[in-house]
Each structure stands twice: as structure tokens, then as C-alpha cells.
Amino acid sequence: MDWFPKQFSQGDIDGQGARRLLGQPNVPLSSVLVRETAQNSWDAKGHDGALSFMINVRRLSAGEHSVLYGNVLTGGLPHLGEAPGAGDSWVLEVADRGTVGLLGPTRSDLARAVGDRTNFIDLIFNIGAPRDVKLSGGTYGFGKTISYVASRLGVVVFWSRCMHQGKLEHRFIASGMGDSFNQDARRFTGRHWWGRTVDQGARVEPLIGQEAQTLGEAVFNRTFRAQETGTSMLILAPKMPEGPQAFAAELSRAAAWHLWPKLVPDRDGRQPMRIEVQLEGERIGPSDPMEHPVLGGMVRALRAVRAVQNGEAAPTSVTVKEIRSQRPNKLIGHLGLTMSSASGLNDEESEDGDDIVSPSHHIAYMRHEAELVVKYHSGVPLGANELQWAGVFKPLLDTDDSFAAAEPPAHDDWIPAAVDDRSMKRDVNIGLKRIAAAADDFVMPHKRAAADHHTESGAALGESLADLVGAAPGSTPRRKSTSGGGAVSKKIARPKIEVAELGPLFGEKRRHAVCISVPGDSTTPQRLDLQLRIATEGSAVDDDGLVRMEGWSDSFPDWDSWVPSGRGGRSCETLGGRRIWAVFSAPADLAVDVRVKTEAEL
């Protein structure tokens, strides 16, 4: 392949300036890299809905290294750096399939017809070209620079298969972005390409057809199958200060925290995007967000917001609030909010979400159709380690452009001051204020309940249910104090009620779930007995059939699919050192006193 360094002409930007276009993102480089490359893939999705996105941290084989540095990057890497040795040549391979690929013209200097897609020149040649895809993530040009920033050499190799003039076509080119330099009494921008030079060396084009396919299959791990279209790229010598394994884990966490909405099936049960992070070709993540102790609540909130914006009813376990302006009376978007148990969190997980801490008190901001997390907004914490809340905000289709205009090049915030249009700026300003106020209104009753909730005993649950899980106000029965002599009783390890979770209404009843921490170790069988009584002023009385035990669960029940099991009635056999959920139902206006005892206490 031919090396083509870009000579300065009027209006050119040098390579160092191009690398700075992202500014200083508020999230780590790995997060920007994952989000921007995934966004580019999403914006280029095809029409069949089968979209996949893969990132693979891998080492080049000796043969791949020889082809890459001998046949592709011919002439070495002038003014860019020293090529790594064959035994330690790591790359980051990013591939999407089910996208349209890098289609369109391969020359940026010729006029194009209105509506023509220009994916190739926008990604390979242009800087800051506006995307022509409605509801896309912004600019192809600015976001792409992160791929060069992530490389110690500033070099990326591209291989794409797309439809061109009704036929499948392979395209192959390499690109570099470094500092400006002087050579042969001429000034060069620091931008480089390796391809096929044409017009007496005046410009460069990609390799096309069989030649491109042969080189692509020689240096890439993920090839094209059958009629697949899409794009693959190799980021050479990626910056991995902690080593490949740690870097791959960091990318996996970034995918989990920023791409999780793409893993949530739509109302037809289809996953918007298949996402995989690999280390040397072995999958390491991301995991199902519904199983994550923080993201699970956000998944429920997203599903509820999707349902409302599709004209459907939201599940009763999630509160969906309209975010609107008053003058003019305009619906801006929807905020979904949900409360859940904080059991299962640990310090390692809390560090994965950049600004997220556990227990969660955050709202995920995302655009209407793109549904990639822009940022996590920190709200009012509950002040109780056993409870957390989470939210998701999405603007409407009609206001999505307002929030798009408020995003910086890295798409990691909404900044009203960045919007020129007064009406659009008002959408963002009012939207952000209303989101914060609505979240505070939702959290405060639960915060008061959490402050009164004592994990040492289930007795306080009767009083807190009015705010915590929606029952009517009641009063916790008080234990009478004892005094005087007598033998000292033997201390018994007691189960603890960690949290109560509000469930959905069905008819005039509501379901509740109570998380119980079982004493003892995993080798000790335990029998738990749940006592459910009606809480009244100053006492508790037998429920007389009003409170119904529905079953026990090893994990928090998914209310949308929960089926009463009746497992063991109000008693349950389990092992010590674990948590177990008890599910019961009661009239919606009833406060319930909950106690749990072990067999030794009965």
C-alpha cells in the first residue's frame, strides 16, 4: 500500500488539533471509546434489525504482524512512532455487523446528491462532518478521534464491506493522526493514510474488491460471513497502562454502564444490539444488566418509560412522571423512578459506574432513540444502606434535537448554555430542573421511611410501610421494657429484615417483598417463620385472613413474571449466611407488622 501524508493547504487542521477536538471528557478514555464506537455502529445500522458490536483486545500473530507492518503500513511509521515487536504487538479490534458499512463515495471533493450516504468519507477523511442520520449521536468526525487518541501510535486500520451500485464491495484503508512535521521543504499536517494513491499522488483512495478482502482477512480476526455488511477497525498499540487483562475488564465495565440500554429487549422481545467484549477472542462481558444490583432498577425504569412513550401502561412497580414546561404547556419527556433493595452491592461494583456510588441514587440521562447513557445524574441519597433508588429520563421524539444540541463533542453531558436556539435551550433548562424536582418528590417519602426503619427487627416495618411500600399509616407495636432480677437469657442469633420492596397492585391488593438476612453459616440449616399481623395504633392484631403469604424467592422477584409459589407457607427451610425474599399480599390501604424468627426462637 502507498503512504500518503497530508500536505498543508488553506483551512487545514493539524493532527494534534484534531486529536483535541473531544476536549476533556468527564468520563475515562475507555468509556468514551466504547460509547463513541458503539454510537457510530448504531447510527449505521441496517434494516434487518440484527446488529452486533464486538470489541476484542488481542495480540497479533506473527503472520498478522508481518502483513500489517510489511504490506499495509509500508515504509514504517514516519513521524508517528516505532512499530511494536512481533511478540508484543497488541491491537484493539472493534467490529460491527448488520450495519450498512462505510458506503458512499470515496472522494470528499466531489458534489453529492441530496440524501446520499457519505459514511466512508465522513469517518476516514472528514473532521466534524454532521451526521445525516435522524436521532443519531452527533458528529461522525469528532467522536472518531477517540480511536486515534486510544492508540500509542495514533494509527487505525479500517476494513468495511458495503453495498455499492447494487453489489457487495470490500474497502480497506489505514489512517494515522500525529503531530505536524516538515519534510522536503514542505509542511505536513500530521494526518496520514495508507491506500492507493491516484492522480499522480495528489490524493489517496482505499483498496477495493478482492485486494481489500485479502488484506482484511490477513490481519483481522472477525471476517465477513455470507451477505454480511459492516465495518471492522484495528486500533494499533492501544494504551493499556495496567496491561491487556485490566484494559479488557475496563472496557467490559464501560460497556455495561454506558451501553446497557442496548441489551434491554424491546416490546417485541428483540435485543437492540448484541454486544460482546473479548480478551484474546474469549468473551468476558458485559453481563445481563437486569442481574446487576444497580442497573436492574434502571432497566425496570427504562422499560416503563418505553411503555409510556409507546402509549402503553407502565408497570405499577415503577413511577413514571411527565416532565413538561408550563409556558408553553409542553411535554418534554418522561422520567421513570423505582425503589429497590441494595443487597448484593459491594465496593468493586460501585466503582464501575464512574460517578455511581452504592446504594444508587442516580438517574441515567439518555436520548430518545439512541438510548446510550449520556451521564448519570446524582440525586438525593436515601441515607439507608439497605435501600436504593434509580431513574431513567428520555426526551420525546419532538424534543430530542434540543438535548442533542446541548451535548459537547464527547456526548457526556447536557449543557443548556451550549444551545443557541432559545426554544431548544428552554427545553433543556426546564427539563433538567423538572427532572431534579420530580426525583426529590419521589425520594423524600421513602427517605423519611428509611430513617425510621430498623434493620434489627421487622417490627418497624408496620410504621414505615405507609411511605416505603404504600400501605396506610399505622403505628408499630412497642415492646414493653422489663426490669428487675432474673437469669440472663442466652443471646440468640436472629434473622434481620434488611429491606421491604413495593410491589404492584392487583385489584384492591398490593404485593410486597421482604429481604431477610439468615443467621449462621452455609452449613447450618435454618427454619424461618414469618409472622404477618395487621398494625394498628399501639398494637398488632391477627390478620384474620387479610394478609396472604405468596411464597419465598432466592432473589428479588421480577414482578412482571412473578407467580405465587406458596413454597412452605409462612415457614421456610434454608441455609444460614444467605438472603432470602418473602413475598406476601395485603389490602392496599393496610399497614402490616412483619416479624421473622428462627426455629430456636419459636
Image: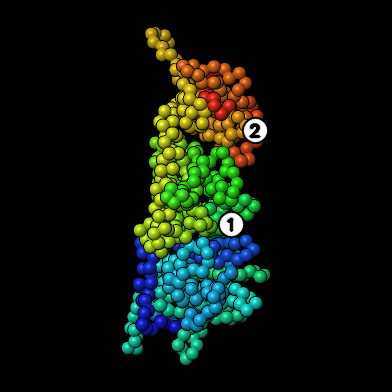
What residue sits 56% from the left and 58% below the top?
275
Q: Which residue is mark 1?
A: 272
- Precedes in sequence: disc 1 or disc 2: 1
Within the image, what quadrant is residue 532 found in?
top right
- Identify the residue at horizontal 46%, vertical 21% (top origin): 475
Residue 84 located left or right of residue 314: left
Side of 62 where 408 appears, left or right: left
Q: Amino acid at mark 2?
A: Pro
Q: How is the image coloured?
A: rainbow
The numbered disc on residue 185 is none
Q: Is residue 62 above or below residue 339?
A: below
Label 1 SS: loop
User: Which corner quadrant of the image does residue 48 belong to?
Assistant: bottom right
Image position, residue 219 (x, y; %): 54, 73
Q: Secondary structure at mark 2?
A: loop
Question: Circle 2 is placed at which residue position?
Answer: 564
Residue located at (65% from left, 33% from top)? 564
576 over 287 or under it: above or below = above
Q: Is residue 19 left or right of residue 320?
A: left
Q: Report the front residue among 193 and 119.
A: 119
Residue 399 to residue 524: above or below: below
Residue furthest to the right in view is 226
